[in-house]
Amino acid sequence: MVRIHRQMWGSILGCLVLACAGAASAAEQTELQGKPVVDSAIGSYVAKAGVSGRIAITGSDTMQPIVAKIASAFLEWQPNVKIAVQGGGTGAALEAFLQGLAGSRRGDGNVKGHLSSNDVTLLAASRSLTEDERSDFKSRYGYEVTEIPIALDAIAVYVNRRNPIEGLALEQLDAIFGRDRKRGAQEEITTWGQLGLRDDWAQQPVHRYGQDQHSGTRAIFIQEALKGGEFRSDVREESGPALEILAISRDVLGIGYAGVSFRASTIRFLPLAERVGAAFVAPSPETVSNGTYPLGRPLYLYAKRNAKAGLEPEVLEFLKFVNSREGQDMVARAGSYPLQAHQVAKNLQILTSAAMSATTSDTALLAGRK
């Protein structure tokens, strides 16, 4: 059994609401984003016998349900491995990853006893680490962090299902959320009428929702949608995507952003255009892979890999499983987009190099003792 540590009760409530989405809405969303299909060229997982140990994974709230699904499936192949999955946001989790600290306590599910200083071995991140963060990691551990993309995702722009708007250009999105309007909009957008809605909608205010500063999704949205600008002061920031989506589902005037895997019968996400007048593009596996959807991104697992010892065996096996047909099927079932076979092959080459470095180190050590 995988222990999933929720940061707050509201996330549980939000996820319960999302899980109760109506069948009609699910069908609509599937049509809009495309059905995720695992690349047939990706090989099946070949389980190594005798693997045991503990893995603590901390990170992105967007990735928590994805990683939990993968972990549960992995334990069917490797039942002697204990896994704890924690959320809380990429930013907050990064510090725990760097320091090696986990939030699980004595008696938390599979994880027994107090976690020691090196128990956090995998960071789930909804954005790539910055150069400063990579340098910080290297200064602490003496080697480069191992980066493994595990899925593709889209930052979707959500509105209440009752909102009739057809789509948005990035310039409009920046004028809704951004204080600086770096995409060149002449005026801020404060009413739905400014976006072309008429009749009763025309004078209604736009209610903006977002995520707090621990969120990797927030950081990517600032970089890609706002071109590095600041958020307006009236954006209502929630502590996690589930709570944000729940707020929009209750607010007919609401708009927000989150990973594309969040669905409910009371909300929908909008296709986006690069500029006003250009064609709207909906998020889908194809449009995210080819870059035509403007807010696509990879999702990452970061691992601690000692240059001499390599990855811990249980971590190596887990990452191999993630990059198998079975692991990528869990990505698809969680609502995100699986990797293509060429990216999986690149990941497996990185993991093979990690295993080889450990074997080479052990051989050299034994040779030195002769």
Image (tube, helix red, strand yellow):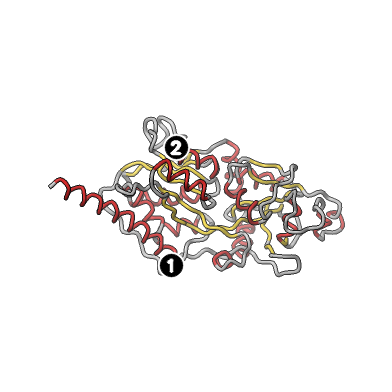
In the picture shown, does residue 61 fall above or below 297?
above
| Image coords of residue 154 (percent x, y) | 59, 58
Of the residues under marks 2 and 1, which one precedes in the sequence?
2
Q: Secondary structure at mark 1?
A: helix
Instruction: Give the residue number, with chain letter if any, for mark 1.
Output: 342
| Image coords of residue 111 (percent x, y) | 38, 36
The residue lying at 73 percent from left, 55 percent from top is 182
Position of residue 290 in the picture relative to residue 145 (left or right): right
> Disc number at residue 151?
none
The residue lying at 73 percent from left, 49 percent from top is 254
The residue lying at 73 percent from left, 50 percent from top is 178
Q: Amino acid at mark 2?
A: Gln
Q: Amino acid at mark 1?
A: His
Q: In the picture, which quadrant includes the N terminus?
A: top left
**Foreground pick, 235 / 91:** 91
Camera sees residue 356: yes
Camera sees residue 1: no
Q: How many marks?
A: 2
| Image coords of residue 106 (percent x, y) | 41, 29
**Foreground pick, 42 / 189:** 189
Marks 2 and 1: CB-CB under 8 Å?
no
2 or 1: mark nearer the eye: 2
* Gap between marks 2 and 1 measured at Cα: 33 Å
Q: Within 10 angstroms of label 1, few (less than 14), some, or many (20 or more) residues?
A: few
Most extreme residue toward the left, as rendered? 370
In the picture shown, does residue 312 fall above or below 103?
below
Position of residue 346 in the picture relative to residue 220 (left or right): left
Q: Within 10 angstroms of label 2, few (less than 14), some, or many (20 or more) residues?
A: some
**Foreground pick, 1 / 157:** 157
| Image coords of residue 207 (percent x, y) | 76, 47
> Disc number at residue 99?
2
